[in-house]
Image (tube, rainbow, N blue to C red):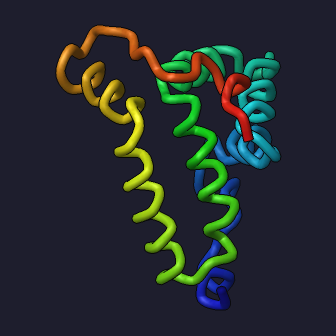
Amino acid sequence: QKIVEQFQEPVEEKYPLGSYVNKHFGKNSVQEILDSIQADKDNAELSEVLIKNMKTFSPISMRVIFEQIKRGKDLDLAENFKMDYRIAVRCMEGNDFFEGVRCTLIDRKDTPKFKHSSVKDVQD
């Protein structure tokens, strides 16, 4: 933790979209992030592209990754590797991973048909 604090930098200092990232991605849920991006009229073009791309992602994967980031910040490296492994194994048990691969790498044009149609459909 001390090493991270020593080398961490505020996003705004080096990244032109740092304030945008901080404004939208510091929310308490994926749905809050999506709602915040959709409501951003100051960066409408960027927000539109981002929402369009995020709609192609597996809703359950977005929720899992969000939770992984929240939990991972309090874990050491070994615990994070364990969590990553467990998530990877569980993702292989469902259909969404294979559906994403089919649409992205095989068909390259098809719209994925994930188990959940939106982040709102994914139960906690």
Residue 17: x %, y % from top left: 63, 41
The residue at 62%/58% (across/down) is 69
- Which residue is farthest bottom? 2
Q: Is residue 31 above or below residue 81?
A: above
Residue 39: x %, y % from top left: 81, 19
- Which residue is farthest top? 110
The residue at 50%/29% (across/down) is 58
Q: Is residue 82 above or below residue 118?
A: below
Residue 89: x %, y % from top left: 38, 55
The residue at 66%/70% (across/down) is 73
- Which residue is farthest front? 93
How many marks overall? 0
The residue at 52%/39% (across/down) is 61
Residue 104: x %, y % from top left: 28, 24
Q: Is residue 107 above or below residue 123?
A: above
Q: Is residue 103 above or below residue 88?
A: above
Closest to the observer, 114 or 108? 114
Residue 27 location, quadrant: top right
Closest to the observer, 58 or 8? 58
- Which residue is farthest left? 106
Horizontal arrangement in the rendering, residue 15 relative to residue 41 (left or right): left
Residue 51 location, quadrant: top right
Picture quarter with the C terminus? top right
Picture quarter with the N terminus? bottom right
Closest to the observer, 103 or 12? 103
Horizontal arrangement in the rendering, residue 26 relative to residue 75 (left or right): right
